[in-house]
């Protein structure tokens, strides 16, 4: 009797195990554990076929397109020119062509002319009709650098500074006389003349270490000046003509300058 009961229990259990995964007894175990997959299943009875030019299909396509990259066809109305749609899709921040092709002003400098050569060069340059785009300047070559103490209170101020220099142990100096060509330096104290600015700066450093803090540097220039021509915004034709004129002055150079 017990064997028969055990047999029927085993048979019923096998039938249940066989039919349960196949849905013979309702929803299977997998469906009960994963209800979200049931929600994601397609419902064929709800599907419908739309024609290619359906407005409903177009609206669904636009709603699914990324907001950051709208297509040219979506931005333009139906039947619009494709070229117009492409222009509509172009970035609004693109700079105008006139701004891209802006020309940077230029400055060209010629020579260190003597007075006679400057006159000849100016006469030939007049044929270019550059007007106010030409400027003529006088320059002087720097020949040396002077370390000095600026004047203050005339001769009496110079005497006080001399006494201070001697107290600091500095005896290499002289008082700039009243006959000096530059009146702004008269009664000042010259502490030395140097050929280069670097040497003058090095001496000023030594003076500061010894307690002299009022020393300055001034460039000394030659008496004979040189003439320099500056020309602005030359066209290619004018630059070619300038090169031809300059060829008659082989000792002069053409260089860039600040406008």
Image: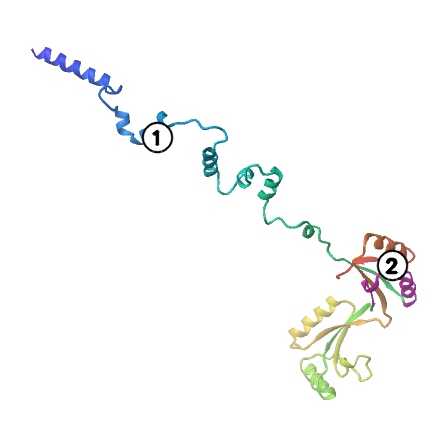
Q: Nearer the viewer, residue 127 or 111?
A: 127
Instruction: Give percent across and percent down for residue 81.
Output: 61, 38
Question: Can residue 57 be seen from the camera position used here?
Answer: yes
Badge 2 is on which residue? 128
Classify 168 as above or below 113: below
Question: Can residue 174 be seen from the camera position used here?
Answer: no
Instruction: Give percent across and percent down for residue 239.
Output: 83, 54
111 inside magenta stretch:
no
Q: Which residues are magenta?
A: 115-137
Q: Quadrant of residue 147?
A: bottom right
Instruction: Give percent across and percent down for residue 132.
Output: 81, 65
Numbered mark located on residue 40 in the image: 1
Tell me the SS state at disc 2.
helix
Q: Nearer the viewer, residue 23 or 174?
A: 23
- Residue at horizontal 77 percent and vertical 60 percent from the top: 257
Tell me the SS state at disc 1.
helix
Q: Nearer the viewer, residue 126 or 184?
A: 126
């Amino acid at each position: 009797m017990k064997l028969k009961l055990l047999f029927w229990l085993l048979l019923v259990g096998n039938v249940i195990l066989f039919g349960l995964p196949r849905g013979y007894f309702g929803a299977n175990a997998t469906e009960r554990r994963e209800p979200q997959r049931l929600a994601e299943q397609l419902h064929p009875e709800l599907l419908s076929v739309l024609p290619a030019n359906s407005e409903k299909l177009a609206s669904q396509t636009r709603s699914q397109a990324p907001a950051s990259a709208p297509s040219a066809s979506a931005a333009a109305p139906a039947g619009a020119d494709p070229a117009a749609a492409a222009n509509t899709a172009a970035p609004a921040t693109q700079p105008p062509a006139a701004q891209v092709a802006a020309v940077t002003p230029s400055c060209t400098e010629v020579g260190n002319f003597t007075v006679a050569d400057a006159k000849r060069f100016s006469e030939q340059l007049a044929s270019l009709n550059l007007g106010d785009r030409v400027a003529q300047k006088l320059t002087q070559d720097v020949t040396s650098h002077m370390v000095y103490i600026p004047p203050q209170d005339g001769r009496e101020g110079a005497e006080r500074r001399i006494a201070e220099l001697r107290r600091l142990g500095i005896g290499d100096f002289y008082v700039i006389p009243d006959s000096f060509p530059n009146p702004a330096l008269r009664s000042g104290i010259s502490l030395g003349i140097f050929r280069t600015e670097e040497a003058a700066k090095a001496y000023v450093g030594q003076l500061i270490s010894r307690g002299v803090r009022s020393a300055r540097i001034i460039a000394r220039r030659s008496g004979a000046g040189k003439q320099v021509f500056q020309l602005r915004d030359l066209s290619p034709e004018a630059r070619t003509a300038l090169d031809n004129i300059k060829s008659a002055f082989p000792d002069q150079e053409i260089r860039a300058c600040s406008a």
